[in-house]
Amino acid sequence: MPIYTNSLVSNAPFLFISGQTPEENNNIPDSIQDQTHIVLQKINSLIAEHNLDLTNLVKVNVYITDASYLPDVRSVVTEIFGEIKPAVTLVVVAGLINEQFKIEIDATASFAKVE
Protein backbone atom coordinates (compact mmCIF):
# COMPACT_ATOMS: atom_id res chain seq x y z
CA MET A 1 0.00 0.00 0.00
CA PRO A 2 1.57 3.31 -1.00
CA ILE A 3 2.04 5.87 1.75
CA TYR A 4 2.44 8.72 -0.72
CA THR A 5 0.99 10.22 -3.87
CA ASN A 6 2.96 10.77 -7.08
CA SER A 7 1.82 14.36 -7.59
CA LEU A 8 -0.25 17.09 -5.91
CA VAL A 9 -1.52 20.48 -7.07
CA SER A 10 -1.63 23.55 -4.83
CA ASN A 11 -2.29 27.19 -5.63
CA ALA A 12 -1.52 28.49 -2.15
CA PRO A 13 1.56 29.82 -0.36
CA PHE A 14 3.81 27.18 1.17
CA LEU A 15 5.41 26.53 4.54
CA PHE A 16 8.90 25.06 4.14
CA ILE A 17 10.10 23.06 7.14
CA SER A 18 13.82 22.45 7.54
CA GLY A 19 15.14 18.98 8.23
CA GLN A 20 13.97 17.84 11.64
CA THR A 21 16.19 15.54 13.67
CA PRO A 22 15.37 12.96 16.36
CA GLU A 23 16.89 14.79 19.30
CA GLU A 24 14.45 15.71 22.06
CA ASN A 25 15.41 17.25 25.42
CA ASN A 26 19.09 16.46 24.74
CA ASN A 27 18.12 12.80 24.25
CA ILE A 28 18.41 10.72 21.10
CA PRO A 29 16.61 7.38 21.34
CA ASP A 30 18.26 4.41 19.69
CA SER A 31 15.26 2.86 17.92
CA ILE A 32 14.32 4.04 14.46
CA GLN A 33 10.65 3.94 15.48
CA ASP A 34 11.21 6.33 18.38
CA GLN A 35 13.39 8.59 16.23
CA THR A 36 10.73 8.69 13.51
CA HIS A 37 8.01 9.54 16.06
CA ILE A 38 10.07 12.45 17.41
CA VAL A 39 10.80 13.84 13.94
CA LEU A 40 7.15 13.65 12.85
CA GLN A 41 5.97 15.20 16.12
CA LYS A 42 8.33 18.12 15.53
CA ILE A 43 6.96 18.57 12.01
CA ASN A 44 3.39 18.39 13.30
CA SER A 45 4.17 21.03 15.96
CA LEU A 46 5.72 23.38 13.40
CA ILE A 47 2.71 23.00 11.12
CA ALA A 48 0.35 23.64 14.03
CA GLU A 49 2.18 26.90 14.85
CA HIS A 50 0.83 28.16 11.53
CA ASN A 51 -2.72 26.88 12.15
CA LEU A 52 -2.24 23.99 9.76
CA ASP A 53 -2.36 20.23 10.25
CA LEU A 54 -0.89 17.18 8.58
CA THR A 55 -3.50 17.32 5.81
CA ASN A 56 -1.68 20.43 4.56
CA LEU A 57 1.51 18.49 3.83
CA VAL A 58 2.32 18.38 0.14
CA LYS A 59 5.93 17.12 0.09
CA VAL A 60 8.08 15.16 2.53
CA ASN A 61 11.74 14.22 2.09
CA VAL A 62 12.92 11.37 4.31
CA TYR A 63 16.62 10.66 4.84
CA ILE A 64 17.58 7.39 6.54
CA THR A 65 21.03 5.98 7.17
CA ASP A 66 20.18 2.33 6.50
CA ALA A 67 17.71 0.82 4.02
CA SER A 68 16.76 -1.81 6.60
CA TYR A 69 14.96 0.96 8.55
CA LEU A 70 12.34 1.37 5.81
CA PRO A 71 9.71 -1.08 7.18
CA ASP A 72 9.78 0.57 10.63
CA VAL A 73 9.72 4.07 9.16
CA ARG A 74 6.81 3.10 6.90
CA SER A 75 4.94 1.69 9.92
CA VAL A 76 5.31 4.90 11.96
CA VAL A 77 4.47 7.14 9.01
CA THR A 78 1.35 5.09 8.29
CA GLU A 79 0.34 5.23 11.97
CA ILE A 80 0.71 9.02 12.14
CA PHE A 81 -0.40 10.03 8.63
CA GLY A 82 -3.24 7.52 8.24
CA GLU A 83 -4.92 8.33 4.92
CA ILE A 84 -2.81 11.49 4.39
CA LYS A 85 -0.52 10.85 1.44
CA PRO A 86 1.82 13.70 0.52
CA ALA A 87 4.39 13.32 -2.23
CA VAL A 88 7.40 11.60 -0.66
CA THR A 89 11.06 11.15 -1.51
CA LEU A 90 13.10 8.61 0.46
CA VAL A 91 16.88 8.74 0.34
CA VAL A 92 19.36 6.40 2.00
CA VAL A 93 22.36 8.50 3.02
CA ALA A 94 25.84 7.62 4.26
CA GLY A 95 25.32 9.67 7.42
CA LEU A 96 23.62 12.64 9.05
CA ILE A 97 25.06 15.53 11.07
CA ASN A 98 25.11 13.43 14.27
CA GLU A 99 26.16 9.78 13.98
CA GLN A 100 23.34 8.80 16.37
CA PHE A 101 20.70 10.18 13.99
CA LYS A 102 19.12 7.44 11.90
CA ILE A 103 16.53 9.68 10.25
CA GLU A 104 15.91 13.29 9.27
CA ILE A 105 12.80 14.62 7.54
CA ASP A 106 12.04 17.95 5.90
CA ALA A 107 8.60 18.91 4.65
CA THR A 108 6.54 21.38 2.71
CA ALA A 109 2.96 22.28 3.64
CA SER A 110 0.41 24.26 1.68
CA PHE A 111 -1.76 26.93 3.25
CA ALA A 112 -4.69 25.47 1.32
CA LYS A 113 -6.10 21.99 1.70
CA VAL A 114 -4.69 19.58 -0.86
CA GLU A 115 -6.99 17.73 -3.22
Image: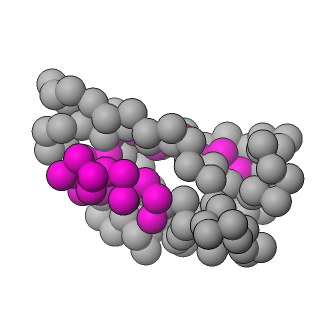
Tell me: residue 30, above or below residue 109: below
58 to the left or right of 67:
left
At horizontal 24% and vertical 37% (from top left) the residue drawn is: 110
At horizontal 75% and vertical 57% (from top left) the residue drawn is: 102
Image quarter hosting the N terminus: bottom left
82 to the left or right of 97:
left
Q: Quadrant of residue 17?
A: top left
At horizontal 40% and vertical 70% (from top left) the residue drawn is: 80
At horizontal 37% and vertical 59% (from top left) the residue drawn is: 44
Query: Is residue 6 in view?
Result: no
61 to the left or right of 92:
left
Query: Is residue 90 in view?
Result: yes
Is residue 38 shown in magenta? no
Residue 76 rendering spot, x and y as whole percentages: 52, 71
Instruction: Find the residue positioned furthest to the front.
Output: 26
- The total number of labels drawn is 0
Q: Quadrant of residue 48?
A: bottom left
Instruction: Choose between 38 and 90: the one closer to the eye.
Output: 38
Instruction: Choose between 38 and 69: the one closer to the eye.
Output: 38
Is residue 46 shown in magenta? yes
Instruction: Choose between 48 and 2: the one closer to the eye.
Output: 48
Residue 20 rendering spot, x and y as whole percentages: 56, 49
34 to the left or right of 106:
right
The range drawn in magenta is 41-64
Q: Quadrant of residue 90?
A: top right
Residue 19 rendering spot, x and y as whole percentages: 56, 42
Give the colouring mode of the picture.
Answer: one colour
Tell me: residue 58, above or below residue 83: above
Image quarter hosting the C terminus: top left
